[in-house]
Amino acid sequence: MTVVASFLLVVSVWLAVLLGPKLSCWTWGPALLALGLAVLAAVPGLWQRRARAAGGGMMAFGVVVVAWFGWRAWVSPVAEFGMADMLLLAAVVGSFVVIRSMQGHALAERVLVWGLALLVLASVVMVARQVADPDLAPVLASRMSTLPTGFFGHYNYGANFLIGSSCLVGGAALFGRYSKAERAIWGVIAVAGMVAVYFTRSRGGICGAASALGVFAVLALIIGKRRGARWFAPGIVALPLIGCVVVGFLFQGWSDAQEARKQAAGLDVMLDNTFRLHLIGIAVECIGQHPWEGGGSRSFSWECYRFWDWDMHGPGETRPEQVHNEILQAATDYGITGAGLLGLFIGSLGVIAVIRMLFAEASGKPSNEDAWRLGGLAGLAGMLVQSNFCFVLHVVPNALLLGICLARTAHTGEAGKPTGARSLVPGVVAAGCGLACAALLLPLGWTGSRVVAVRWADSYGTPPELSPESRIAALTAAIRWWPLQKVFQERARIYQQQAAASAPGSIDEAAVKHALDDYREASLLNPFDPDPVVNRANLLGLVGREAAALEEYDRAIRLQGGMEAGFKAAYSKAAYLQLKAERLLSERSDGEAMAALWSARDTLVNSCRFPSGAPLGQVARVLRAGIAGRLGVLLSLAGRDREAEAEFENAAVMGEGTGIRYFHAWHLRVRAERIWNERKPAEALGLFLKARSLIDRTGPTLPAGVTTEDQAKLRKELDSFIQFLKGAKIEAAELPGK
């Protein structure tokens, strides 16, 4: 059964890399199903003598770490995120348990090494093909980058997997008790895997690979010294050269990665990544809200919004769903307690592994202990270093590999024949953890596999052009098996698109109702996400449910915090209010229209810092200018000249288009006539001249409802006033602020 467990673990890793290298937990289904079966097959081996070896104290510590993370995930505010993190935790623990059962089983270990080696080789080939063809996506329907990623969707994920798996294969190649031919093949594959990391152009991956190579070299010398290897003395002499090679790999790789992004390649740029620094600062703020217990699984993904500051962090157009640092992610989501337990556990495993490498007693029979400790610890070091730059451990392939590296780092070697009930404890604990993992992995793995099957057409390979009805049917089946927020949102968007495609003047009420229901379900699953709330508000406004729409807009604005550029809740509310004002104007309800425009103006000013602050963007500036034009006209008609002038000047400061200048010129003409009637001809002439200048700069762009005939008529009226006043020998007065 141990060999079967090893084979199933290899199958799980392959399925994870090919089908589930993304953050979407439903894509992990086939890999988790295979892992659950592997764990069941491994349980009998946990009762054998080799699985009850020394290390009960660390195992107990590991159980405490798992219990803390499992409990905090279970009680997380968003159950979906908690379940995803529990699956990742089960992937780590499950692979750890399987490796624990294999300890000392030569055939099972050989199966594992060959499985990993062939997967590394396939990944290297895919990276090479993507260097030549950046658009190549072998299994996934699309990739998040044109940089080489292997089978993964993102180059960071692919680089992290190559680091860990190459180190494991390299350790077996250097110190494994296998044939020379096998070791030679594995050695070449391991080197190729590390070279492939360079071609991913992942800066964090290059740092991780350099760290892994350095740890690998130092540990290899430690083992060589203890074994009395003939190459130890030359290795010590060559150590400075090895260090130079590693440092050169780091700096050259980073420079080339910067050039691939068309960025400067100097040391100052290498150390300056403001986006990640911003996320670190925000994570520290989040940790301060709940320092010891954390905010729950993925809590950073919504808590970060409240701490986003435009002046410090920029507009915030990209949603920072994860901290680009796994240590701070753990501290944010699981508290300083969780991050501390995790760091202490991994650090203790590393220290114990190094001590065992230094002082391991000679054994009379062949053993792969050194090979596994070397590969596991070097791979672990490389993966963790890269995890300080990206959330690479939140995808299931790398979670599986993390469990394998941890188990190999914790390799305890052969123990003597166990005696007494105390010797059963490690086996009982390991078997209990394995069964608990299987109880979680098997049902959800099966469910995820069904979702993968039904969504294959739109998520894998080269997706055909599917009709909206086909996509809705697939998503409906997926929701029936595993109701996830993102899937509800995806289906809602299709319904929303159908509603938007309705004939002018008509509304597809059925599509709107379905979309509203799906957005509501998405909000129930994650009440902290502003996105479904904004979309629901837009639909409510479309069908005339004004009070409900405004309530949802306000809720979305509260949820998004400083992330207006990412969700546009305030912009959407202002746009809705502007449309309402236009409708009221057509109904001759000028007072109500003015109130709606004031509300729209205040919404934009408060969220986008108009008029003096940095604006949100082109679209929002156009909206602000349109609101200013209509509001300025209404204020002018009401005799509130100063307020009207302020609106027009604000729009002019934004510099958006030239249509607003028509309304400004119209207002100045009205104001000039009023002043002329007050027997102030000099001031009136100044206003007429300013209005005429604005008309000359209006150009072809005109506000909605204004024709070129209206423009020509206004120009003619201004020319008539100016000609009359100048004919009367009136000198234009200098206008205030001119």
Image (cartoon, grey):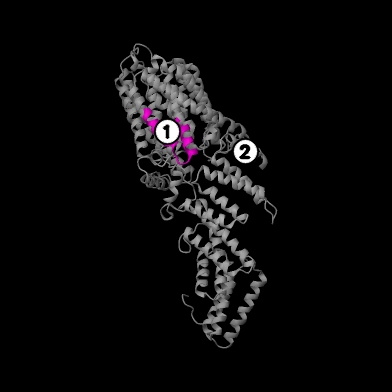
Q: In the rendering, at what x and y percent does residue 727 appear?
A: 59, 87
Q: Position of residue 478 (x, y in %)?
A: 59, 36
Q: Nearer the viewer, residue 358 or 582?
A: 582
The answer to which of 281 and 253 lies nearer the viewer is 281
Drawn side of residue 288 relative to residue 145, left or right: left
Per the rendered image, the range of residues in magenta is: 62-89
Query: Position of 122 compared to 267: left or right?
Result: right
Residue 249 shows in the view: no
Q: Main secondary structure of the magenta part?
A: helix
The answer to whether 7 is drawn above or below residue 268 in the figure is: above
Q: Distance between the residues labelled 1 and 2?
A: 30 Å
| Precedes in sequence: disc 1 or disc 2 | 1
Crowding around mark 1 (Cα neighbors within 10 Å: few <14, some 14 to 19, many 20+) is: many
Instruction: Decide whether residue 571 is among the magenta residues.
Output: no
To which residue does mark 1 refer?
Answer: 70
Residue at 30%, 22% (x, y): give it: 358
Q: What element carries label 1?
A: helix
Q: What element carries label 2?
A: helix
Magenta stretch holds residue 70: yes
Q: Which amino acid does label 1 sit on?
A: Gly
Q: Mark 2 points at which residue?
A: 476
Residue 483: name its quadrant.
top right
Q: Point out the residue furthest to the right here.
A: 503
Q: Where is residue 339 in the image (x, y as percent from the top left)?
A: 36, 37
The image shows a total of numbered marks equal to 2
